Image (tube, helix red, strand yellow):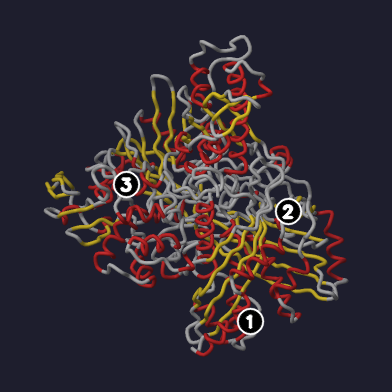
Amino acid sequence: MPKDGGIGASTKRREDVRFLTGAGNYTDDINVRGQTYVHFLRSDVAHAKINGIDTSAAADMPGVVQIFTGADFEGVGGIPCGWLVTDRHGEPMQEPAHPVLAQGKVRHVGDPIAAVVAESLEQARDAAEAIELDLEELPAVVNMKDALGDGSTKVHDDLTSNLCYDWGFVEENKGAVEEAIKGAAHVTTLELVNNRLVANPMEPRVAVGDYNRADGEHTLYTTSQNPHVIRLLMGAFVLGIPEHKLRVVAPDVGGGFGTKIFHYAEEAFCTFAAKAVNRPVKWTSSRSEAFMSDAHGRDHVTKIELALDADNNFVAVRTETLANMGAYLSTFSSSVPTWLHGTLMAGNYKTPNIYVNVKAVFTNTVPVDAYRGAGRPEATFQLERVIDQAARELGVDPIALRRQNYVTEFPYATPVAVEYDTGDYNATMDKLEEIADIAGFAARRKESEARGMMRGLGINNYIEACGIAPSNLVGQLGARAGLYDAATVRVNATGSISVMVGAHSHGQGHETAFPQVVAEMIGIDAEQVDIVHGDTAKVPFGMGTYGSRSLAVCGSAMVRATEKIINKAKKIAAHLMEASEADIELKDGNFSVAGTDKSVAWGDVTLAAYVPHNYPLEDIEPGLEETAFYDPANFTYPAGAYACEVEVDPDTGKVTIERFAAADDFGNVINPMIVSGQVHGGIAQGIGQALMENCVYDDNGQLLSASYMDYTMPRADDLPFYTVDHSCQTPCTHNPLGVKGCGEAGAIGSPPSVINAVLDALNSGGHDVAHIDMPATPSRVWAAMQK
Amino acid sequence: MTKITMTVNGKSASGDVEGRTLLSSFLREDLELTGTHVGCDTSQCGACVVHVNGVAVKSCTMLAAEADGAEVATIEGQAAPDGTLNTIQAAFQEHHGLQCGFCTPGMVMTTAALLKENPKPTEAEVREYLEGNICRCTGYHNIVKAIMAASGQEIPAIAAE
């Protein structure tokens, strides 16, 4: 049994008390003395030339402080993209300008045209209605295939076309893949859509800019997953503010799911405007505004081919994808369909030949970027769908077909440039068969059929690359930042500890789980350890939380810093006990001399560090504080097997999730309760994608799903209890905790099993349906049954 | 501007509001009770649920002036004065029924209304009652589990792990 508060214990979350009593401190809860409010006037058309903006009447409205337009941002940098993708021909991607406020043209519904700063939010809104716009509407480009057609309207007039890049991976493998497909015994082909989603963390985005003329320091309070990254991007690329004059604070953040990674125009605006009007400026997004200004996710259209030999061994995979970038390149947008997608096309299988082609396309829609899983759900969905379809075409068991093709020896270098360090895919499938009671499915189907329902079972595997990322590798691939992380362990005189971490917790429970690691290493009570995060003035450095990286990367930095602390503390303890440092042992918070009964407590050593009366001052400095940066040697590779059972109503096409099971291998686990919670939430989002969620534009680029009335997210009564298990553990071999990351798995692993289950149900009912696009709404399922 | 007075968490509170001021804004901005959250603008998400005269309402969908003279209960008044969590709050912590915490105040206030109406709800009744509260983090698994536990019932075996 793990010690409570130590590694492996389901310690209850300490952050819960403030959240349960209304004492959380979210960005919208922050008001700064003298604060003004900004309301953005946003484009209500998808594409137009701005012929004029008349703000004169609005400027005279009550309470208006100042009105800004794109002209005020001439000479200011644009919102940057963090990843330069090089195309198949060695050319850099096309990278359009992305001004803070629109200049010359608007390119999507929601593109900000003007910003009214006023004494109150209501006054700002009222004045925005008095701004007179002269917009010359242009044809909108919405469909990606149309956008790439000859003579298509261009989203950006200064680019050669709407093609951002045409990426081939691995380009040298293209010929071999063609040959393998030609020579294959069987080829299964699917064309499918990975539907456009909106992340929808429950807390809308907020930004508060403040400027202190006395010392020239800017402060931005913002709903971010990575305050240091915002400081870097906004300071260096947009506003030209050096780091020591820019503080970014991300306090309690109400969910992120990727959409709060990116640097947004509203953050730059509030920071810029606070100096311009010499008062704090606050923006709080409405939910409707969030739908048209938060980066969206997914939105791929794909053709995938799976080639098998006569013995049903996979011999080749070839995929062609159109990936929607929206109107501008958001922070990580270019990397999602390429390096976070193409590199995962081997899945859990030893397919020898793989070629991935991705064309990224500009359209008159909101920018698209990382959403929980980011590229890996898109890879998993197409691969696990095509495998299931191949099994159906060949008349073989889908589990057996997968098992036959598993990678079983590790490390394994895939044909798509990554090396899996550990895994045991048969073990997770065994566990899944057990917890999902696959053997009992036939009886359950019979029971459903007796009630006139069709019942289906869908299974799939997934693998993901987490713990982004080795800096030297991603640098070669075009990343414009390092992706290490940092932690500072500050031990106070009385032995209590503050750990400043570059990761940011917005639901993941770092404030509980991270201290479990430090407490275990030193052997003290976890209550003595606090985590500090979310403020560039308090935390020396960090790259934030995304890509299931917090524990694998930042946690590793924390371990390294704690090791340095222990080493120094041992030196102090050796001095106090007049012993050799080599003989000092640390156990349960006590330093002892091996083979003797001499010992000093943790608190004696920490006190000596700060009251160095009896202290080896000639050898070591007083104080006890250490920092470590950790740059991972490889990605981590969580993997698992998921099973979904659905009932489909033959009269209405309504799909009900009856059972859902997930067997994951996350390597070592620090807090199993938190890990299960992460998987639950991911599964719900994956089921949401598979059955309900869809971001819809009409042909004119109008966003039709712009509120919770139109964009369907799962409610409690849409979902069952899930059975989750993470007892299959093959520890990561290259980080000190042996952890892999668990934040995205549920969202990556669940959509294919849901769709596979729906198709199994339909086929069991005599409907020969090869594929159904997500979301499998009742109308789509019903239509599929009528064919 | 209209002067309004109401009892909030047992204490008298008054302020001057515009006709269009929402109860959620009055609580958050005037009374600085920022535990009540606003997550949407269409009355869908339920993060803003409070009790007005003992009934759960979405405070973003009620004008502050309409609550003039009412008894209002918010998340800030749920724990004991010494900070001890009430049964529902304690169950949410015990069963990890919250992650980012943003929907949590609304979930707790909705649960209080549910258990007042129906002290021993079935799993299906819990799920149906939560229809007006969206959580994006937990997949509802641990919320439903916490509510079953708060009602003093056995947790279904499938949810117990």
**Neighbourhood count class around disc 2 (C-alpha, 10 Å): few under 14, some 14–19, many 20 upward:** many
Does dot 2 land on a helix, a strand or a loop? strand
Does dot 1 land on a helix, a strand or a loop? loop
- Residue at (64% x, 35% y) in the render: A630
Which is more toward the observer, A491 or A541?
Answer: A491
Q: Position of residue A586 (x, y in %)?
A: 60, 30
Which image quarter: residue A68?
Answer: top left
Q: Is A171 left, or right, of A194 in this rendering?
A: right
Q: Position of residue A467 (x, y in %)?
A: 64, 45
Q: In the rendered view, tell whether residue A674 sits above or below residue A557.
A: below
Q: In the rendered view, tell whether residue A246 sits above or below residue A715.
A: above
Same chain for mark 3 and mark 2? The answer is: yes
Q: Which mark is residue B130?
A: none
Q: Are marks 3 and 1 in contact (CB under 8 Å)?
A: no
Q: Which mark is residue A167?
A: 2
Residue that label 1 marks = A769
Residue that label 3 marks = A22
Q: Chain of mark 1?
A: A
Q: Earlier in the sequence, mark 3 or mark 1?
A: 3
> Comparing marks 1 and 2, which lies closer to the viewer?
1
